Image (spheres, grey):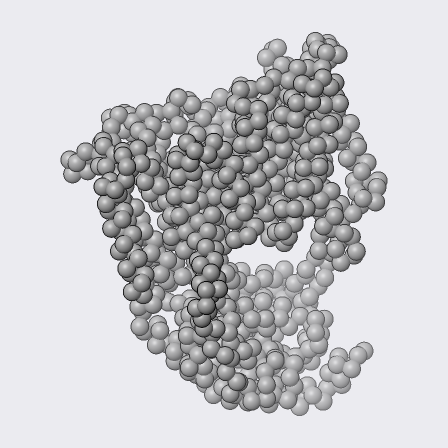
């Protein structure tokens, strides 16, 4: 089963073509890494996959289901979850509240206009478990604004995992983390079972290369090289892209 | 927690005994008006404060309900039926408001709601065969729930108080509920909420219906109170005043819109006897709040209180626990 | 037949007047990205100033220009002292202009009381001028001509001067303009003052047609809004076209569909906001 398939995907902003005819396939269970210099269009690709922006042309299939025109919120219900490069969580709310929102998004409870959210014990326990998974349960009642950057990054991951995704998109999960924190996140990612497919964007090569089974190199919105770790690392085009053409 | 509960109880006692300690019928009526407008302000705040959507057309929704019930009553329909039809009609109009205005946010939303309010006002003003235009519609009598008369100031006050308490209860439930929480989430990070699986449009649509319902209720009460409706109640200044109430009182709390409503009603009816230029004072207060206390009077004055207490030597509220070192 | 001709004449005159009112509104909206809800008040206050100046014995045209200048100064003060405090917070700025409209309205009521005050047509423009089969009231013709002159002057300003180029750049994209070294905050003050001045001038010009009364601001503001939304924010051509469309809707609407007159007036605005927010000639949605 192909978890994610992109066919001839195109996107332009004004006159600038940021995604050019991308073809991309990730089989279920794989750990895929997307690399490329700044401006290569990596985050845009994620935004196209999650539906936050609409493609100009091409098709997107999630677990062999056509989702090209589907609203973003619907895609989440199909098992898609993602973390963001820039933290866009809810700073004035507690960590527990942030994670609870992630859980609520997929729960039929979210339409209830009567019951107090606080009283939903099951939801609260799931949120605590999700935070525990990233080692932050002791900070559950801390407002997000009063946590460190590394902690916030881990909250992002907790929220994405809380949604029990089938396809997890991680946008630079290691950015700005200390060495210790990186090791923690690495362990965390390694512990994610195989029924979750993971696609990651990363700049930190050491950590990322460790994680990746296959690597896709993007540049100027196009796929330049794709293959296993050693294939991509040894490909001369990779060197060209990173050392200048 | 206990302090809050005690304060709420005290407020309830105060409100429940108003006719006893308030000077005369005129002032009891003032409190009734405050409660009616408080319901309107609370309903508007669902969108403005919790939804982040500023509407300048909400007087239109109040007007639809008021006109509907007035029209039906003046043609001999029963009280209960009239009220029910009026509220259903208001919900339908709210749905139209929502579908059109939710195509935008921010200033676009404001202008769409403004034009909708103007269309409703213009219809009331010009569709004379339907609404009697500027001459308005008189309502023969106030309802008599369970046979009790609402003709007196006191009687009407208690009726209004009960409805007001129901509104507060409803708002409290909504705000704490998953739907209310999702609405606030969508206000703060709409994109993120969508990515988390929330249908932001539908959440806002439902919030609009909820808001419209209570605006309609305030319209009913207004009609029963005045026993008269006219296009003025839906004109632009009316919507502006409603917004003024919400913003001056503060959008982040339930008490805020109530305080704002009290401010405006008192200024209009009571202060106008002493301060001739109440409109100017109101406008000036509004401008001052926007510039100096953008979060509104209630949170702003709470902030001032805390600052004042801090100055008197009490230790300031403990700063949030120091950041723990990264593990 | 004569009814339609009269309506057409009135429509054109109103169109001219609305252009004087809305051109400034459009520029303010286009550059500062806010619908200036005090604009109707500027119109009314300018008209009252006109009453004052005329009462001092000034000539109609001088009074109109003086009112415009005074309103421009007031506009500049409002922008510098108040609006600038809220730089970047457009919604708060809109609400501020709303609050100001309350203040201005009440000040006018306080000073000039509640009775409508007519403004006399300037003596040289009393009477009618036959043009073909149409008999144009001279004053209304003058209003249209003045509007045309102002339109030409504004177009020259925007299209042929450096200042105009800066304004256009700001309307296009204020952020980029700032980065390119244009003193956008100075432009804000200038454009707001210009808008206020034009509105005040328009108020006096409109005096003989509408007279001056409390509530004039509430009557005019929605019209300016419709014009600018229809025509597109920041577009002079849009303001021109929109003004005449609204002028015709305002006069023919009640004649053709008396009960739905206001619906006819606001429906186009609603339709534009919902379907094509940038209007006929605008660059951005509001």
Up-down relation of residue A152 to residue A112 (above or below): below
Q: Is residue B122 left or right of residue C74?
A: left
Q: Nearer the viewer, residue C276 or C239?
A: C239
Quarter of the figure with residue A140: bottom left
Q: Residue at x 42, y 46 (%)?
A: B260
Residue A63 position, x and y percent, is 49, 73
Q: Is residue C186 left or right of residue B106?
A: right
Up-down relation of residue A36 to residue A61 (above or below): below
Residue B99 position, x and y percent, is 46, 46
Residue farthest front in this picture: B312
Quarter of the figure with residue C126: top right
Residue C143 position, x and y percent, is 71, 21
Q: Nearer the viewer, residue C165 or A225?
A: C165
Q: Residue at x 40, y 48 (%)?
A: B259
Up-down relation of residue B218 to residue C214 (above or below): below
Up-down relation of residue C123 to residue B300 (above or below): above
Residue farthest left in this picture: B147
| The N terminus of chain C - image quarter | top right
């Amino acid at each position: 089963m192909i978890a994610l398939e992109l066919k001839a995907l195109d996107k332009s902003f004004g006159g600038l073509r940021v995604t050019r005819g991308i073809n991309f396939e990730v089989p279920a269970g794989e750990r895929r890494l997307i690399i490329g210099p700044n401006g290569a269009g990596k985050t845009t690709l994620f935004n196209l996959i999650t539906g936050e922006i609409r493609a100009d042309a091409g098709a997107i299939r999630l677990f062999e289901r056509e989702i090209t025109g589907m609203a973003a919120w619907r895609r989440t219900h199909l098992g898609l979850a993602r973390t963001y490069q820039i933290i866009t969580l809810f700073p004035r709310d507690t960590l527990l509240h942030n994670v609870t929102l992630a859980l609520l998004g997929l729960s039929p409870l979210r339409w209830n206009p009567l019951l107090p959210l606080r009283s939903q014990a099951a939801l609260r326990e799931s949120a605590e478990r999700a935070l525990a998974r990233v080692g932050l349960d002791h900070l559950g009642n801390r407002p997000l604004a009063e946590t460190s950057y590394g902690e916030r990054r881990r909250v992002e991951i907790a929220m994405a995992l809380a949604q029990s995704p089938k396809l997890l998109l991680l946008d630079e999960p290691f950015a700005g983390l200390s060495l210790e924190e990186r090791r923690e996140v690495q362990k965390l990612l390694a512990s994610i079972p195989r029924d979750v497919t993971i696609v990651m964007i990363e700049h930190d090569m050491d950590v990322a290369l460790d994680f990746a089974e296959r690597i896709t190199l993007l540049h100027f919105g196009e796929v330049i090289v794709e293959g296993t770790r050693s294939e991509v690392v040894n490909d001369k085009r990779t060197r060209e892209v990173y050392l200048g053409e | 927690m206990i302090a809050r509960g005690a304060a709420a109880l005290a407020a309830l006692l105060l409100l429940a005994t108003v006719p006893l300690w308030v000077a005369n019928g005129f002032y009891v009526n003032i409190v009734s008006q405050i409660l009616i407008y408080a319901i309107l302000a609370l309903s508007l705040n669902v969108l403005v404060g919790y939804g982040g959507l500023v509407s300048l057309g909400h007087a239109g929704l109040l007007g639809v309900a008021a006109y509907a019930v007035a029209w039906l009553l003046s043609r001999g329909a029963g009280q209960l039926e009239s009220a029910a039809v009026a509220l259903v009609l208001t919900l339908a109009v709210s749905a139209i408001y929502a579908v059109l205005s939710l195509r935008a946010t921010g200033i676009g939303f404001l202008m769409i709601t403004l034009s909708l309010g103007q269309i409703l006002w213009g219809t009331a003003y010009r569709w004379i065969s339907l609404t009697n235009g500027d001459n308005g519609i008189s309502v023969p009598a106030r309802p008599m729930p369970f046979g009790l008369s609402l003709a007196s100031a006191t009687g009407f006050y208690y009726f209004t108080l009960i409805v007001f308490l129901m509104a507060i209860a409803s708002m409290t439930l909504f705000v704490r509920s998953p739907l209310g929480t999702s609405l606030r989430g969508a206000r703060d990070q709409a994109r993120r909420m969508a990515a988390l699986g929330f249908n932001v449009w539908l959440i806002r649509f439902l919030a609009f219906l909820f808001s419209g319902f209570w605006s309609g209720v305030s319209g009913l009460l207004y009609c029963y109170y005045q026993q008269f409706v006219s296009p003025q109640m839906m004109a632009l200044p009316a919507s502006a005043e409603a917004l003024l109430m919400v913003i001056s009182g503060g959008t982040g709390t339930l008490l805020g819109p109530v305080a704002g409503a009290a401010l405006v009603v008192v200024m209009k009816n009571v202060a106008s006897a002493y301060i001739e230029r109440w409109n100017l004072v109101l406008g000036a207060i509004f401008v001052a709040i926007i510039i100096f206390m953008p979060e509104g009077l209630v949170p702003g004055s709470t902030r001032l209180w805390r600052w004042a207490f801090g100055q008197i030597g009490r230790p300031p509220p403990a700063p949030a626990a120091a950041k723990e070192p990264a593990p | 037949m004569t009814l339609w001709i009269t309506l057409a004449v009135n429509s054109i005159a109103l169109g001219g007047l609305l252009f004087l009112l809305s051109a400034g509104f459009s520029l303010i909206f286009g550059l500062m990205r806010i619908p200036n809800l005090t604009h109707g008040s500027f119109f009314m206050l300018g008209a009252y100033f006109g009453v004052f100046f005329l009462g001092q014995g000034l000539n109609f045209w001088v009074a109109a220009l003086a009112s415009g200048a005074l309103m421009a100064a007031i506009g500049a003060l409002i922008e510098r002292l108040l609006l600038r405090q809220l730089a970047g917070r457009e919604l708060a700025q809109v609400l501020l202009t709303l609050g100001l409209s309350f203040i201005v309205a009440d000040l006018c009521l306080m000073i000039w009381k509640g009775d409508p005050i007519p403004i006399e047509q300037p003596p040289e423009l009393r009477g009618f001028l036959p043009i073909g089969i149409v008999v144009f009231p001279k004053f209304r013709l003058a209003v249209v001509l003045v509007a045309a002159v102002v339109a030409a002057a504004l177009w020259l300003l925007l299209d042929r001067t450096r200042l105009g180029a800066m304004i256009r750049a700001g309307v296009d994209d204020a952020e980029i303009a700032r980065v390119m070294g244009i003193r956008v905050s100075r432009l804000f003050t200038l454009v707001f003052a210009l808008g206020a001045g034009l509105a005040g001038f328009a108020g006096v010009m409109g005096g003989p047609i509408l007279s001056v009364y409390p509530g004039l601001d509430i009557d005019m503001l929605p019209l300016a809004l419709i014009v600018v939304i229809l025509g597109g924010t920041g577009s002079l051509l849009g303001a021109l076209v929109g003004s005449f469309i609204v002028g015709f809707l305002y006069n023919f609407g009640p004649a053709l569909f008396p009960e739905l007159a206001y619906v006819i007036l606001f429906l186009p605005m609603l339709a534009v906001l919902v379907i094509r927010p940038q209007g006929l000639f605008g660059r951005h949605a509001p």
